[in-house]
Image: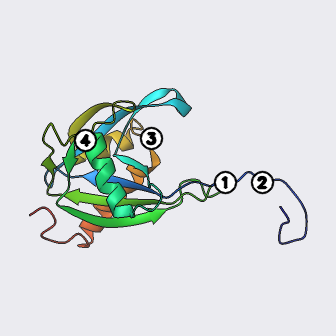
Amino acid sequence: VRLRTGRITERLRLDHPEAAAVLPFVDDRHLLMVRQWRYAIARETLEIPAGKVDPGEAVEVCAQRELQEETSHRAGRLLHLASYFPAIGYSNETIRIYAASGLQPLSPGEAMPDTDEIVQVEALRLDHVQDLILQGAITDGKTIIGISLFLAKRQRGEIPDDFFA
């Protein structure tokens, strides 16, 4: 690439589709998280459901699809919390983070579990998830950002009063 100074150098750029991540709230104190094996780091992680947007798919549709595939639940409501670039130094990926409420379990015929990735679905208390982040047990960026932004927005009164209704 040619830098703004005119100097020529090398850069790595990864073109990546947009992605959606979801904080699926069972109620105002509990959310669903997924344990999954992550090949790149060769270990299991605890994180919020997420995945890549398919070609021609709306981001909100992707968020619902990933929630259904990874937790076998659908959301009655999605609230956009933020969008961010997880690897701005080398990738154009954008992740849009949503909070979800009004969860309904899918019937066995509707469920389409992602058995290739998801090891286990767990319902955890929000304050426990926050403790796991502070202890360094949860290290996934989208999960840390999503939980932190949700808590900050709730404290500032930016989460609608009827979000969990």
Give the spatial CA distance, label 1 vs label 3. Answer: 20 Å
Question: Can you identify the residue that label 1 sits on?
Answer: 90
Question: Can you identify the residue that label 3 sits on?
Answer: 139
Question: Can you identify the residue that label 2 sits on?
Answer: 11
Which residue is most to the left?
165
What's the residue type where badge 3 is placed? Thr
Q: Nearer the viewer, mark 2 or mark 3?
A: 2
**Residue 31 percent across, percent down from the top left:** 21, 47
Does the CB distance between marks 2 and 1 fall below 8 Å?
A: yes
Residue 112 is labelled as: none
User: In the displayed structure, does residue 32 sit left or right of residue 165?
Assistant: right
What's the residue type where badge 2 is placed? Arg
**Residue 48 percent across, percent down from the top left:** 34, 46
What's the residue type where badge 1 is placed? Tyr
Q: Earlier in the sequence, mark 2 or mark 3?
A: 2
Mark 4: few/some/many CA within 10 Å (<14, 14-19, 20+): many
| Numbered-mark total | 4
Q: Nearer the viewer, mark 1 or mark 4?
A: 4
Judged from the image, the secondary structure of the residue bearing numbered disc 4 is helix
Give the spatial CA distance, label 1 vs label 4. Answer: 31 Å
Q: Nearer the viewer, residue 149 or 37?
A: 37
Mark 3: few/some/many CA within 10 Å (<14, 14-19, 20+): some
Give me the residue at 37% from left, 43% from top: 133
What's the residue type where badge 4 is placed? Thr
Question: Can you identify the residue that label 4 sits on?
Answer: 71
Judged from the image, the secondary structure of the residue bearing numbered disc 3 is loop
